[in-house]
Image: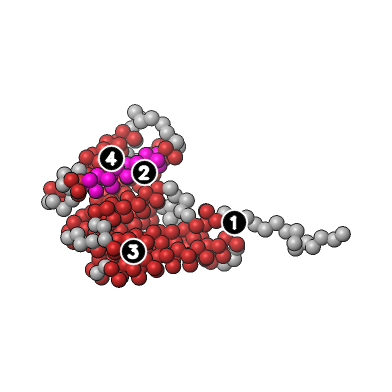
Amino acid sequence: MTTNANSSKIQPTVRLKGIALPTEHGAWGFLFEPLLAGVMIASSFASLWISLLIIGAFLTRQPLKIFLSDWKAKRNLPQTVAAFKFVLLFGSVSLIGLVGSLFFAKLESFYPFLFILPLGIYQIYCDASKQSRQLLPELTGAIAISSSVAVIGLAGGLPTGVAYSLWAVFVARLIPSILYVRNRLRLEKEKDFSVIPVVLAHFGALIAVGLLSAYGLIPKLPLLMFTVLFIRAGWGLSPYRKRVKAMKIGVWEVIYGTLTALSVVLGYYLQI
């Protein structure tokens, strides 16, 4: 009895989860911290559609990165096909969100997206070139994704200064966090790391939030969390820290980020 050689070939296994969802766990925090804060502070019909637009665009990035990388290398693998299908799926979700957003929100609400458009193009370039794990793409990505709070705020009727100040708060939260995590991980791996840039970034963020609060553009409560983050940065990179695994560092950053977002929301509603 003969066996067909072609039918006996083992088909390569495609891990759909790795194609469809971001592998960086911290990216989810970067997405939802400003997004949820914006929805809770400036909830409107538009905010739901804008959230759908942003989540769809966020989910599109991972399969698009794989597809562009394969396309650039002139590969046509099972993962390439799967990635393209996910791009179409998540892109459709984002498109539906865009249509709904344009229906319910004024065009001025989308100005922050115009500002970050060059950053988005740069992000796509870095993804296709497999450079997205470098420091600059991570920083620009944080600036881009946190713009969601400004767009939702403007669509929900917040004053322009307040909406952009909320964006500044989350930029001030995310950029120092990226610097801290990168250097903390290097420290735990006994590699060269830098304390001064991390501490200066946290101190600058604290000052910026303090100024925004002093001018009445944001509540004062977030100052407490930014003080905690400043202390965390100094202690976490000191000889007195407790050695922890990378996963625990990431979990704690999610907790810090959630508490920061809550401080913004509670401060807004309690007027403190």
Q: Residues in magenta?
A: 249-266
At 40% across and 51% down in the image, what residue appears?
Answer: 27
- Label 3 vs label 1, nearer the camera: 3
Marks 3 and 2 sit apart, C-alpha to C-alpha, by 25 Å
Q: In which quadrant of the rendered image does the N terminus lie? A: bottom right
Q: Residue at x 29, y 63 (%)?
A: 45
2 vs 163, left or right, is right
Q: In this view, does 1 lie above or below 267?
A: below
**Pointer 3 with pointer 1, Cβ within 8 A:** no
For mark 3, give the secondary structure: helix
Distance (Cα) linking label 1 and label 2? 29 Å
Location of mark 1 (residue): 14
Identify the residue position indicated by label 2 in the image: 254
**Mark 1, secondary structure of its residue:** loop
The amino acid pointed to by label 1 is: Val
Asked whether 251 falls inside the magenta stretch, the response is yes
Is residue 123 shown to the viewer in this render?
Answer: no
**Label annotation for residue 121:** none
Q: Within 10 angstroms of label 1, few (less than 14), some, or many (20 or more) residues? A: few
**Is disc 1 in contact with disc 2, using a CB cutoff of under 8 Å?**
no
Question: Which one is earlier in the sequence, the residue at label 3 or at label 4?
Answer: 3
Chief SS of the magenta region: helix
